[in-house]
Image: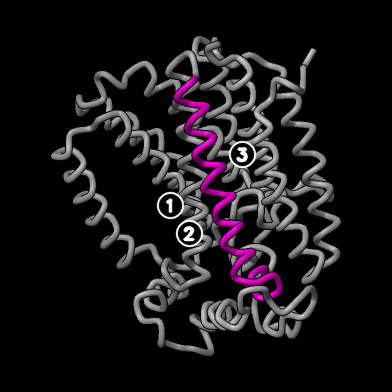
Amino acid sequence: MLNYKHLDWRLNLTVLFLIAAGLASLASTNPSLFYRQLLWLALGLVLALFVISFDWRPFVNYRFWIFGFYFIVIALLVAALIFAPTIRGTKSWLRIGSFQFEPSELMKLALIVFYSRFFSRRHAAIAQIPNSIVSFIYFAGPAALIILQPDFGSAAVLFSIWLGYLLVSGIPWRHLLVVLLLLSILGTLAWDSFLKPYQKERILGFLFPTRDPLGINYSVIQAKIAIGSAGLFGKGFKQGTQTQLGFLTEQQTDFIFAAFIEEWGVLAGLLLVAAFIFLIFEIIKIGLDAQNNFSRFVCLGAAILFVVQFILNIGSNLGLTPVIGATFPFFSYGGSSILTNFILLGIIQSIYIHRSP
């Protein structure tokens, strides 16, 4: 039976702080989503408690289950392309009755688990080109399906997970330069052949911040206004002008950070960032104390996923990265991301419980 005293409560309390901050912002800007987020959080907690009850140390030996999970999620991505309704120009959400979720979020978890086994068994030989190519194929397959939705944001996150594992596994720099060169060529081909006009506009809007201020750059400009006008302590609960008057779009997801700072202040925003940084260091520490490479790589993958999404979310609010729909882990609204994050949290807590004495 699970002894709650054995959990890493520093990690739990940090996550609780991020969740509370997100709920405070949702309660101000969209009360209906506040209650829906509570339901997702309750379901995520149940999943986390279930996952914590397993000892994940020997999981590296269960090749059938790891491959099975990976290919089941790929099947869900294919199903999304065929059956998912088009919402905001993408076919990303599968619906089962009133329940809907994004298979791309589950793919992030599947890829972390898959790569943790793959690299834990091959990290000493990852410098061999065939191993690097094989690892790329396992990323490229689901990434291609996600791009077809189209969802370049999630594909970029999957790429970051793959690249992060390669870097930590000690890939030679010359091989990495070849990879980056090939990706640059693919990026050029994608620009000419695959990217839709609105996706090109987002990239151009990022490169040229003054371009189309009432169109593609409108949301970023409003986010900067919200942050810049907040002051040290903010304008107060339900007092944010950009959020309450509807100037700031996607206040619950892409620009929740700006919405939060406008009402709670720059000081609260810095505290939020500090809490997230502490969360990452705590996950890395748990990974370093783990008893096997599989557990270490799981913690590594979780840290990469959280950091990349954090940078993309915060960066889009400040105009430092393109707006690609990345969530702020445990802070942004989103059922699929909440469930994925809680499952990862459960695995990490299980690794902590079974760490070396």
Vertical order, 294 against 316 (above or below): above
In primary-sequence order, the first of circles 1 and 2 is 1
Residue that carries the numbered disc 3 in the rendered image: 76
Q: Callout 3, which amino acid?
A: Leu
**How far from the left and from the top, in percent, is residue 299?**
50, 30
- Secondary structure state at the residue bearing disc 2: helix
Q: Callout 2, which amino acid?
A: Leu
- The region drawn magenta spans 260-289
Vertical order, 254 against 94 (above or below): below
Residue that carries the numbered disc 2 in the rendered image: 312
C-beta proximity under 8 Å, tags 1 and 2: yes
C-beta proximity under 8 Å, tags 3 and 1: no
Front residue of this view, candidates 112 and 70: 112
Residue at x 64% of width, y 66% of height: 256
Residue 271 magenta-drawn? yes
Vertical order, 236 against 269 (above or below): below
**Local crowd size for mark 3, using a 10 Å CA cut-off: few (<14), some (14–19), many (≥20):** some
